[in-house]
Structures are given as C-alpha cells and as structure tokens.
Amino acid sequence: MRWVKSGTAAFRKGLADGERRGETDSAKVHAVVAEVLARVRKEGDDALVEFTRRFDRFDLRKRGAAVPRREVDAAWKRTPKAIRGSLALAASRIESFHRHQAESGFTVEIPGALLGQRVRPVSRAGVYVPGGKAAYPSTLLMNAIPAKVAGVREVYAACAAPGGELPDVVLAAARIAGVKGVFRIGGAQAIAAFAYGTGSVPRVDVIVGPGNAYVTEAKRQVYGWVGLDMLAGPSELVVLADDTARARFVAADLLSQAEHDEDTFVALVTDSPRLAKKVDAELARQKRKLPRKEILAESLSRSIGFLVKGLDEGIDVVNRLAPEHLALMLEDPWGAFERIRNAGTAFVGHHSPVAVGDYLAGINHTLPTGGAARFSSPLGVATFLKRTNVVSYQFRALASDAPHVMRLAKKEGLFAHAQAVRVRTKKEAP
C-alpha cells in the first residue's frame, strides 16, 4: 500500500488519483462498443452469433441463446443442498429489505384541483450477470429480486458464459429469483440485445447489473433508448479507521474487495501510524494464504493509505472519494457516519465486514462507483419504477390561475400556451 501523509504533495496527488479512479481508454472502448451495438441493432441474432464466437469462443447456433428450463432444473439438482439453502436465505433477506422501498404515489388537493403522482413498474427488465473471472449468483439475486418486488412482470438475465457453460450456482439463483428467461450471452452484445431486441432476446425497458469496461460503455451508449441502473465500474472500498481498529479486520476487508479484479480500488484512511504499520504487515501475511494472488498483487499495487491529522480530515477525504463501500472502524462509528455525505453502503462498526453486504445482509450490492455516490444511489426498487404526474383542474381553479399562467406564457413568448388557458376561461358569447 502506498502511504501518503497529510499536508504533502504526495497526499494531494493520492487524493487526486483516488478521485480519478476507474478511468479507461475510452476512445478504444467506445469504438469497439459502437460497432457491436450497431451490428446487433441491424442484424439481430446473426450479430450475436458472430460476437459470441469471437469473444466467448462458442457457437451460439449450436447451444442456443436461451437456456432451456430443463437445463436450469438440472443445474438446481446438481447444486449442493447447503448452497441452495444459503441462496434461499440470501434471497429472502434481499426481498425483505427491498419491500421497505415500495412506493405507492400520492395525491394532494389545492382549491378546485387535484394533483398527484402515480407509480407503476416497467414491464420488462434485463439483468446482466458478469462471469469472466468468477461466478456471481449473488449479483443475479441482487438485481432480479428488487425488480420482482417492484412488480416487473418479465425479468430476464443475460449471463456471460465463456465457452458456453454457465455455472450451476448461477442457474440455481435464477430459479430462486424467478426470472422468466436466462440467456448465455455476455459483453456489450448482451446489452445491445436487451436494448434493441433480437429474434431470440426480448427488448427490455431497464437494464441493470455490473460488468467490465465494455459492458459499462455499452450501457452508456444505449441510455435514452432504454433505462439504466447506473454505470458501475470496478469494485472499491475505503476503510476509515482509528487506533481502536484491529489490523487483521482492516486487512481482511481490504483483501476481500481487492480480490475482485485487477482494477479494484481499495484505500485506508487513518490517523494512526501504528495501525498503518500493522495493516501493512497483515496484508502481507493474509494475502499469502489466498488463491487469487495475481489479482491481489495488481490491485494492491495501486492501493492508497491516507495518513491524516485527525477524524475531521479523514471524513473530508472519504466524502471527496465518495466510495462504493465504506467501512467505519472507529471508536464512535455512528458519530462519524452522521457526517458522511457520500458513500454507496456504509459498514458501521468493527464486526460489519463488507462480505455480509455482498451476500446475506439483504442490502443491495449493486452500488455507485468511481465517485458517483456523490449523486447516485444503490440499485433498488425505485430503479424499476416510473412515475406519472397527474393534474386535474376544475373550472374555478383554472379561472383563478389563468391570469398568472397567461402572464408567464406571454413573457416567454409562448402565446399558444396562453391561448390554451384563455379559451377555457373566457365567457362564451350568448
């Protein structure tokens, strides 16, 4: 971990590097994705076949894009009973948490008029599940279950399947989540298929789920044609800790996120030089026992340790970084939490590892990254809802408001607006 000390040029550079995390070679990625989207939009399934052969190395015509129900059922039977039980428990926790996010709309009355907002779910949602470096049944649950809670009638999953094979545990999660269909399609071509529709893949209203730089860029380019959850990048964690934190807990959490991907961003913010030294030693000790050594070495090589003067400066650093995951390992974590403005999920206290949020606590693990927690929120039921404003005036209310509306409309040079009010309120000739 690269340590930078408060008040130094290295500290300022480290903070700037942290704020710019997740940047990619956007020109190259943009061009590749633009070609994929254009081809899928024009050629449909033929383009899916070509890109799947090129990127995932199997023939989609032989295997079929849609996973048959019998294959899902067979995967369910092959999945160990204990794993099925854990998936079911996670699903129930996710459903329970997200039911608290339900919206029912509202109505208000002003003299002579009724105003309101009606809330309805979208009709179809597409869930993207990455699969290049690991199996992610938890991601399928986290994205599909809130859609079902919102009332979405048709939820589909597109799962990256290098070589054409999907892990049994992912298909088992699909069965638990009650998705309508699973497609063995990954990458930008999966996003294109959901956005535009093909012969085998239905067009959806909202696409959710994390992915690599190409998936994220594809989501960026189809936005407006279809709704999105967010543009999620590599996983990230910031730990804010003081001298009461246990170094082995801090190191374990940092490693738990660092193992996701080489581009993962992890950082420790502390005012304790003693803790900083002990965490470095713990990182070295614990990572020797973990299997994803190359990924850990790469992500940790870019990790940053901020040695701050005190808690106030530490909280300022956190708010500037606006991390996806924030762990508060402090003597008074709740007091600090009250001052945190920007974080996707906060894990408060020494015994709240990020891993429980990734799998079982019930909160959603699809979160804003790259500093987007400054203005964005975790995926939830609201992601799948749309709102319609309602206005219903009676004559007396319109007559009362008419002079103001016409005055403002004429000031903006929109005389037809004024006329639409005037024709309804002027006294008709006998």
Image: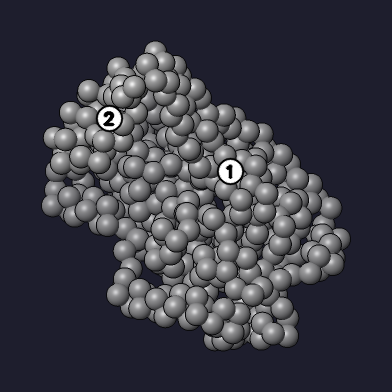
The residue nearer to you, when weighing 195 against 396, is: 396
Residue at coordinates 66% horizontally, 73% vertically from top-left? 200
Q: Residue at x 41, y 16 (%)?
A: 112
Q: Could one spot residue 92 in this view of the protein?
A: yes
Q: Residues within 10 Å of mark 1 (few under 14, many from 20)?
A: many
Which residue occupies the foreground of this view, 421 or 363? 421
Which mark, by number, is residue 121? 1
Amino acid type of the residue tagged 1 in the rendering? Pro
In the rendered image of this protein, does residue 71 appear above or below residue 142? Answer: below
Residue 281, compared with residue 215, is above or below; it is above
Q: Which mark is residue 349?
A: none
Q: Helix, strand, or loop for circle 1?
A: strand
Task: Please state, as top left, top right, bottom left or bottom right, where the N terminus lies in the image.
Answer: bottom left
Contact (Cβ within 8 Å) of mark 1 with mark 2: no
Which residue is tagged 2? Answer: 422
Query: Residue 34 is drawn in which quadrant?
Result: bottom left
Q: Residues within 10 Å of mark 2 (few under 14, many from 20)?
A: some
Which residue sits at x=54%, y=55%? 205
User: Residue at left 43%, top 64%?
Assistant: 222
The answer to whether residue 309 shows anywhere in this view is: no
Closer to us: 134 or 379: 379
Q: Secondary structure at mark 2?
A: helix
Q: Residue furthest top?
A: 111
Q: Position of residue 22 (x, y in %)?
A: 35, 61
User: Residue at the front extreme?
Assistant: 430
* Residue 20 located left or right of residue 127: left
Foreground mark, 1 or 2, reads 2
